[in-house]
Image: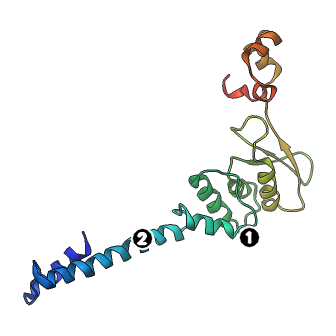
């Protein structure tokens, strides 16, 4: 409902105002229009002030508070990363909490314990090969994980068995037009 209509609805029972036509009706339209504009502005900034709903200017302002920008490239991914980073607290040093916190990288990342003391392994599920934003992700991962841990990164590529199932020879691979880095990451096709 527009604010001018709301004002009329509130004033109608009083019976002392001319609500339709004339000078007073124009006044209600003007006041109601100003309130509509104010409401639209406040709604926009309410949305932009919350990390879970920010889209543009508000999201950029939230991200400017961080020492590093998450690697995500969509507003949804940036909001999810920002939410994960804001959730990091004093009790965030369990393996499960660290995995939740790694969502702050902006791309899927997972930390697992290894058999070597004080060493963890970080992998990127669903991302074959080396992620394009690895430098940005590595900086954020190393900021999130406790500083006393040694971090090994694990990447996954096409295995020879999978390669042989897809390409019968190197000539077939050459004719496919794929670069070697594209061939390494064909795991999603198989």
Q: Nearer the viewer, residue 115 or 180?
A: 180
In percent of width and height, residue 175 lies at 75, 13
Instruction: Say whether residue 87 is visible.
Output: no
The answer to the question of whether label 2 and label 1 lie on touching residues, with beta carbons closer than 8 A, is no
Residue that carries the numbered disc 1 in the rendered image: 90
**Of the two numbered discs 2 and 1 in the rendering, the one whose residue sits closer to the viewer:** 2
In which quadrant will I find the N terminus? bottom left
**Mark 1: which secondary structure?**
loop
In the figure, is residue 96 to the left or right of 24? right
The residue under the point 92% across, 52% down is 117
- Which color scheme does this rendered protein use? rainbow
In percent of width and height, residue 52 lies at 54, 62
10 Å crowding of disc 2: few (<14), some (14-19), many (20+):
few
The residue under the point 80% across, 10% down is 171
Instruction: Point out the residue furthest to the left here.
Output: 15
Residue that carries the numbered disc 2 in the rendered image: 43
The residue under the point 11% across, 87% down is 17
Q: Nearer the viewer, residue 59 or 186?
A: 59
In which quadrant will I find the C terminus? top right
In the figure, is residue 48 to the left or right of 136? left
In percent of width and height, residue 8 lies at 16, 79
- Residue 84 quadrant: bottom right
Instruction: Point out the residue furthest to the front here.
Output: 23
């Amino acid at each position: 409902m527009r604010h001018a209509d709301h004002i009329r609805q509130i004033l109608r029972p009083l019976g002392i105002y001319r609500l339709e036509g004339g000078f007073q009706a124009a006044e209600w339209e003007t006041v109601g229009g100003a309130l509509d504009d104010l409401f639209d502005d406040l709604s926009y900034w309410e949305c932009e002030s919350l990390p879970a709903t920010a889209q543009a200017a508000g999201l950029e302002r939230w991200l400017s508070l961080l020492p590093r920008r998450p690697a995500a490239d969509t507003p949804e991914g940036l909001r999810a990363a920002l939410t994960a980073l804001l959730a990091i607290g004093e009790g965030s040093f369990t393996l499960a909490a660290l995995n939740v916190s790694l969502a702050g990288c902006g791309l899927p990342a997972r930390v697992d314990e290894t058999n070597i003391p004080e060493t963890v392994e970080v992998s990127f599920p669903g991302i074959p090969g080396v992620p394009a934003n690895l430098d940005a992700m590595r900086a954020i991962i190393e900021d999130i994980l406790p500083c006393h841990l040694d971090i090994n990164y694990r990447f996954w590529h096409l295995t020879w068995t999978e390669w042989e199932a897809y390409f019968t020879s190197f000539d077939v691979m050459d004719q496919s037009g794929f670069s070697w880095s594209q061939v390494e990451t064909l795991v999603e096709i198989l």
